Amino acid sequence: MSTRRLPVYILADVSGSMQGTPIESVKAGIRQLHRDLMSDPQAIESAYLSIITFADSAQQIVPLTEVAQFQPPEAMSASGSTNFGDGLRLLLECFDAELVRTTAEQKGDWKPLVFILSDGAPTDSAWSEYASALTAKRPANIIALACGDQADTSVLKRVTETVIEMRDMTPDAFKSFFKFVSASVRQTSAKVGAPGAGGAITLPPPPPGITIVP
Amino acid sequence: MAETETRVIIPTAAAPAAEPPVVAATWQEREPPDPWCPAELTAHLPWADEVVRAHAHTWSARGRAGWTLVAGTRRGRSHAHQAQWREDAAGFASLPAADGSALHLLVAADGAGSARWSRIGSEAACRAVVDFAALHGPNAADGGALVTGAAAFAVDELRRLAAVGGALPRDLRTTLLVAALWGHPGHEQLACTQVGDGAILVRTSDGNVTQLGVGDSGEFSGEVTCFVPDPEATARAASALVRRDAREVTHCLLLTDGIEDPFYPLARRGAGLLAQLMDGVREPAEHFQRQAVHGPVLGDPAMHERLAEWLTFERRGENDDRTLVAAVRAAAVER
């Protein structure tokens, strides 16, 4: 690996409650995210995108891929339960398999950005174990979005301090969220090489309709 | 009569056909809309008008006792694209010591991108180090105490600036690399220290290139844990102090991470970097997309112009500001 990457993971809930407009809005949002990142040369050179979905089980539908080669997934569909634990398990597996850490021989990736999106509460019992593993390792800057009024923000808070809430699940609301995602990735990729203390990042303010969960 | 089939088409959230094509952007050079010096600090920076605000600036000087000093700093493509100022700074000084020997001081700084006035922090830190050396260097018996004292002075100066400018110390955060070479020919010593990332290299007359000290780093890139003027910065500078005999040193280089990272690991690639500077560039370095072909940088009569050219190399993803400060022994130039 000769290029340092800014890995960006989207961990999306595709359970049955996301059927219809929500899943179509997520797909449109990912297309918008790709288009936005292609308009930024720093993001083109640094950002790598991966899409992981979870319902009855989790799957990585797009492995970590550079922005210029990224193909937004069109076959994403929503059905089944909310196996959040399997999503977190797969995210941890992807970290282990895909991230490059700094060694004496090579500079590592930039600290990854993860956006978790869920509209419900976990239906599995293992999520807590994986949430603990994730917070213990702290291998990424994680932002979790609770969308709709059924999302359990206390669960997302177990994974990350940075939880935002979007009560509305209209196409426009999802569009605003994905604009926030692309602004966050662009802002982070613009600061690579000049980070804050400890690799901390500063995110853009959330758009109207999206609030920070204290 | 057959029934007419009625189809109702409900548009989904965003039909792909309605979306504009994806177009890859290219790098742009843009001028910063803001003045270099924030209004809040204008009255507190008497040297602000002296600062060279060019996006790329290189200069050199003949030092004492056969040493030549050169510095180059260049705004990275990322800052250029975002219409931001260069946040790296550099400085050097050649001073007479009380015992008739010479003292050479090198300094480089890389303002933290997350700090709103880091360009001021890096410049002020470099100036503080040079000012401290001018005041205390000529009578300093110990160059080690001089570089750590200069770093501590830079910390104090940035905290003072933050206070008078109504800012927080973290608004001025910067890395800092300092090196001093002193002593009579044949008895020269070198001391250096750093806070944050970047690298200090020395080359000796046998051709060996060594990195002195270790930059601040973590599991991932850019995980710097301490900057000037953080509370622990003075202690970090003291603990990072490296001293060595400099009788055989032909080159001493300070590099900010804009150069260190594209050439990482310097333990393996430092010699190649020095070779480019000493012998010229015949082909791009490993993994580089583009590098201007030119003759020797160090030793060329117009070395600062050559350095400006060398600083334009391109490597994918490496678009940070770049700064190099070097002291070169005359014998190495004339070899």
Image (spheres, rainbow, N blue to C red):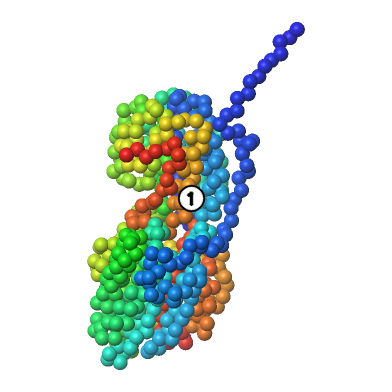
- In the rendered view, tell whether residue B6 sits above or below residue A119: above
Q: Who's the residue at 34% across and 56% down the image?
A: A197
Does residue B273 show up?
no
Nearer-the-camera pick, B52 or B41: B41
In the rendered image, residue B246, in percent from the top left (x then y), is placed at: 32, 81
Chain under disc 1: A
Q: Quadrant of residue A104?
A: bottom left
In the rendered image, residue B261, in percent from the top left (x then y), is placed at: 43, 63
Q: Residue type at mark 1: give it.
A: Arg
- In the rendered view, tell whether residue A164 sits above or below residue B320: above
Q: Who's the residue at 34% across and 86% down the image?
A: B95
Nearer-the-camera pick, B78 or B206: B78
Q: Who's the residue at 51% across and 62% down the image?
A: B32
**Residue bearing the label numbered 1:** A186
**Residue at the top extreme of this rendering:** B1
Nearer-the-camera pick, A175 or B104: A175
**Residue at the right extreme of this rendering:** B1
